[in-house]
């Protein structure tokens, strides 16, 4: 009997010790929520002066928090950029070259790192880094997320989502609101467990094909007439096939999606306020690439989604962390999605992965201790003609997607993924559109086969990238090209598996 009492006392003490440790950790460690819009370019916010869009929540975050004015997506398309958030690395290091290329299971994710630090980790919305089904080696669970309600790609109204890899089901409602509601339930669970939470909320909006709630559409009725003389080719919501529609109607729907996404972020912020959680929660919003052709008409920058000019890679970004940041205002230093992992690791007190990273810890910049970025940023769209397709990195049957979407491709409404083993580095592997960006200049190279175009822009004097100053600055060009080639060599070394040995 005495032994039983001692055993019970010991068990109770251990429980109290564990409970106290968890709750102290939850009190001290900031909660982290990463939010990302799909195809949401730099100018498509009220705070950046858009002539039509209403984004009151993002505007308020830009005022009350930190607005990253020169924030870039690591790539001008979605899957590669999302991989850079998860890994802190340029997507060419692990073969995520384009949309539909998966991550590699060997990669170390931010969720895995924060999970080891005691965080409760959840993913909600678009994944697009491999199938979200249960047996996929590249689903969110394989990369450290405890729970997920996710789609292989993007989604619209009444989305079809998979919960923790189970069979996809239709959930009625507006897509952005659905994933925010699910994220709030996840936070409640984390709080009951006494754990800090890490959430990745990746919206399906505003990717085409567009749709919107009637009240949101009415906000932009005037846009229909403003752009009545133009048309654009995009996906039909009825057939999933390409169709041509008046641009004004398209933009009304696109803007309605952005406003709905903005509102859902506001509901999350309000709920965090009500639960006294917002003070020590990091909210970090950004886009995944520049605006596509239908929406780029209002942008002050050159290029669009898919290009290496700022219209293709410069995106909106705002951060709030009331407890952590004394200052608020505009950060003008160059920053990029690859910086998210090392910055969060620093904040959480978690060691960085022992492999080549392309992102840097932004805390010195965000805190005001450092004005500019000390290291340049490399961008690179790997030449598709140089992809070695002989050996799949993952068995093809494991790369088959299950969550349908409106847009039909290759005769189906789901998406499959791929990744390949690359056995060696050759001289031709260095080709493809690429950029080397420092605090003053942006070097842009387009190269395919034997054709090469080199451009240099002063990013402060010529933000529209309209004047090529290569001929006036041969020494700067030569130095930047040499730095870019060294970085590419490092990236290719990773691509053939050098970081996994």
Image (cartoon, grey):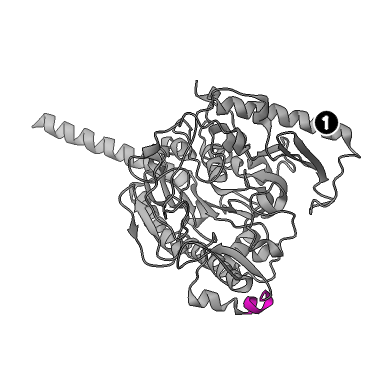
Classify residue 239 as left or right of residue 386.
left
| Residue at 61% over, 41% down | 339
Q: In this view, does 433 lie above or below 279?
A: above
> Can see residue 265?
yes
> Can see residue 440?
no
Q: Is residue 29 above or below residue 92?
A: below
Which residues fall within the magenta stretch?
222-228
Residue at numbered disc 1 = 478
Instruction: Give the residue furthest to the top.
Output: 501
Q: Is mark 1 on a helix, strand or loop?
A: helix
List x then y, in percent, for residue 7: 17, 32
List x then y, in percent, for residue 90: 60, 37
List x then y, in percent, for residue 262: 54, 64
* 226 is within the stretch colored magenta: yes
Instruction: Give the residue furthest to the right.
Output: 472
Classify residue 473 as left or right of residue 368.
right
Crowd class of label 1 (few under 14; some 14 to 19; many from 20; radius 10 Å): few
* 158 is within the stretch colored magenta: no
The answer to which of 162 and 200 lies nearer the viewer is: 162
Q: In this view, does 210 lie above or below 335?
A: below
Image quadrant in which the N terminus is located: top left
Magenta segment's dominant SS is helix
| Residue at 50% over, 46% down | 30
Classify residue 42 as left or right of residue 161.
right
């Amino acid at each position: 009997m005495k032994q039983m009492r001692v055993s019970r006392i010991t068990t109770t003490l251990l429980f109290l010790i564990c409970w106290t440790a968890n709750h102290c950790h939850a009190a001290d460690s900031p909660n982290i929520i990463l939010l990302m819009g799909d195809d949401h370019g730099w100018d498509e916010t009220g705070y950046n002066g858009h002539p039509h869009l209403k984004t009151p929540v993002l505007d308020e975050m830009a005022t009350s928090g930190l607005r990253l004015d020169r924030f870039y997506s690591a790539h001008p398309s979605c899957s590669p950029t999302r991989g850079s958030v998860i890994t802190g690395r340029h997507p060419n290091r692990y073969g995520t070259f384009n949309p539909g290329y998966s991550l590699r299971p060997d990669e170390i994710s931010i969720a895995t790192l924060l999970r080891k630090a005691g965080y409760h980790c959840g993913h909600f919305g678009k994944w697009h880094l491999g199938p979200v089904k249960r047996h996929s080696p590249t689903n969110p669970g394989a990369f450290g997320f405890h729970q997920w309600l996710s789609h292989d790609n993007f989604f619209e109204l009444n989305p079809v989502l998979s919960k923790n890899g189970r069979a996809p089901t239709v959930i009625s409602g507006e897509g952005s609101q659905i994933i925010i509601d699910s994220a709030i339930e996840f936070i409640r669970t984390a709080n009951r467990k006494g754990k800090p939470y890490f959430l990745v909320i990746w919206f399906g909006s505003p990717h085409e094909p567009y749709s919107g709630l009637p009240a949101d559409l009415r906000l932009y009725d005037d846009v229909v007439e403003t752009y009545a003389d133009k048309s654009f080719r995009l996906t039909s919501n009825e057939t999933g096939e390409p169709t041509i529609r008046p641009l004004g109607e398209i933009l009304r729907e696109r803007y309605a999606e952005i406003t709905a996404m903005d509102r859902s972020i506001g509901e999350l912020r309000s709920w965090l306020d009500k639960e006294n959680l917002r003070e020590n929660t990091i909210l970090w919003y950004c886009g995944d690439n520049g605006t596509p052709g239908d929406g780029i008409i209002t942008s002050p920058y050159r290029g669009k989604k898919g290009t290496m000019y700022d219209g293709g890679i410069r995106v909106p970004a705002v951060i709030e962390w009331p407890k952590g940041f004394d200052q608020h205002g505009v950060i003008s230093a160059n920053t990029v999605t690859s910086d998210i992992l090392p910055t969060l690791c620093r904040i959480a007190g978690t060691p960085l992965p022992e492999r080549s990273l392309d992102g840097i810890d932004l805390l010195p910049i965000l805190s005001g201790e450092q004005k500019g970025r000390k290291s340049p940023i490399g961008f690179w769209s790997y030449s598709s003609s140089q992809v070695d397709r002989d050996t799949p990195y993952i068995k093809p049957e494991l790369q088959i997607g299950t969550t349908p979407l409106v847009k039909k491709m290759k005769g189906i409404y789901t998406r499959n993924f791929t990744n390949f083993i690359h056995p060696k580095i050759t001289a031709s592997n260095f080709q493809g559109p690429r950029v080397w960006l420092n605090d003053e200049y942006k070097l842009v190279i387009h190269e395919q086969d034997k054709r090469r175009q080199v451009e240099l822009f002063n990013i402060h004097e010529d933000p529209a990238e309209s004047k090529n100053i290569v001929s006036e600055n041969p020494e700067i060009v030569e130095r930047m090209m040499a730095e870019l080639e060294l970085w590419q060599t490092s990236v290719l070394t990773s691509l053939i598996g050098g970081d996994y040995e």
